[in-house]
Image: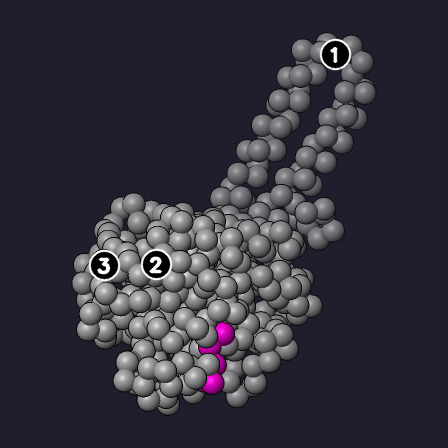
Amino acid sequence: MDICLVGINHFTAPISIREKAAIRPIKLSDALQSLYSCIPYGVILSTCNRTEIYTTPNGGGDARTSSLKFLNMYLGITDTMLFQYTYSSLGEAAVEHLFRIASGLDSMIIGEYEVLGQVRQALATAEKAKMIDLPLRHLFQSAIRTGRRVREETFISKNALSISSVAVGMAARVVRDFKNSRLLVIGAGEAGALVAKAACDRGLSNIVVASRSQERASSLTDMLGGMPIRLNDIGRELAICDIVVTCADAPHCLLGAEQVEAAMKSRPETPMVIIDIAVPRNVDPEISRIDNVFLYNIDDLSITHKNNRQQREAEISKAEAVIAMEMDKFDLWWQDYKIRPVVRSMMIKAEKIRYSHLEKTVQKMPLLSDEEKYRLEKMTKAIVGKILIDPVNALKKHGHDDNSDYLKIVEELFHLKGVVK
């Protein structure tokens, strides 16, 4: 299969490296245009856990080399980092990897829902950018179908956690009196809403939401309760809050060491817990050096990941069975796809020959009725179909073998080169 995957994820690289490869949703279209300068067809899947590039070499070129060139050129990831932290897969391995992602098996939190929407959005954005060919479209549509089936046919996502809910759970374990704490959520998008909801579900009601968009922050607090503030007002809030969870889509840090240090001067004996689940990070790592400030990032949730995996082990094997079935379907589709141009060329050439000889015959028999002409048409088509059925079946059986010259032999036997495909 001519499908190539190059990526970097939470298994191969820490957050300090992953954030260099992260592509914000608002920048994804620009990134695809940059990828186009390296290879004509590709999809970029960028989440908090991974940045992956799926390509096909349509039009020539080495897909893996092209993807690495894009990472180096657009994201500024050095050759040393690429060698150390990236992985690549070809063919069936790349397909299975995407199916596992869409099914929630490759996530930090096994069974999480959000990734399926992210796979769907990656496809939609690539479609809009005209970076999709038929194999990539079918690959991603198959992955989305697989993800839906796994969630419908197994309990892998029953009571599923999210990164946001895990972050709140960590805060509840660290802070002594969680329900009476004051929580500052920085970011009012989907992740921020999940943080606020998870905190409410645990009985915490004193919530403040900060966002670049006052309207979005107000909408969230109107729905779940709490108080909206602007990002510019974060400094005052830091002096009185107990927990900060950051999950804003931002290209740079929103919380600097100087801000937090200034806030802690007014509350030196009161600890502050900061949990940064954004990628790229919203919080300057240097903040961890400040006394009585406890900083965690998304990679610190790995203990929950291990426990969550153990709890869902039985469902993982069921999900893998669904993935295996979908892999078989994709493999059958690919076999047909690979031989399709040759089969079509055979059909076109045979039809041209049939039609040409039929026309000559009919012209020599001017007394034929319309009914007789129709019967001749049907008969000649049936003859051509009968002649081609064995070669087509043989192509379906042997033509998909990557190590076979079967397709080339058929092209030579039937003189198909130059036939419009």
Q: Where does the image place residue 206, in percent across and percent down from the top left?
A: 31, 61
* Mark closer to the chain start, 1 or 2: 2
| Mark 1 or 2, closer to the camera | 2
Q: Where does the image place residue 112, in percent across and percent down from the top left?
A: 33, 58
Look at label 1 and name its amino acid.
Leu
Residue under label 3, please give it.
202
Above or below residue 107? Residue 116 is above
Magenta residue check for 30: no
Look at label 2 and name its amino acid.
Ala
Residue under label 2, please give it.
196
Looking at the rendering, the stretch of residues picked out in magenta corresponds to 254-258
Residue under label 1, please give it.
368
* Mark closer to the chain start, 3 or 1: 3
Above or below residue 167? Residue 104 is above
**Marks 3/1: CA distance?**
86 Å
Left or right: 309 as drawn, with respect to 223? left
Residues under numbered marks 3 and 2 in contact, where contact means CB atoms less than 8 Å apart: no
Q: Where does the image place residue 390, in percent across and percent down from the top left?
A: 51, 41
**Marks 3/2: CA distance?**
10 Å
What secondary structure is the stretch in magenta mostly built from? Answer: loop
Look at label 3 and name its amino acid.
Arg
Report the front residue among 285 and 177. Answer: 177
Quarter of the figure with residue 240: bottom left
Quarter of the figure with residue 346: top right
| Crowd rating for badge 2 (residues with CA inside 10 Å; few <14, some 14–19, many 20+) | many
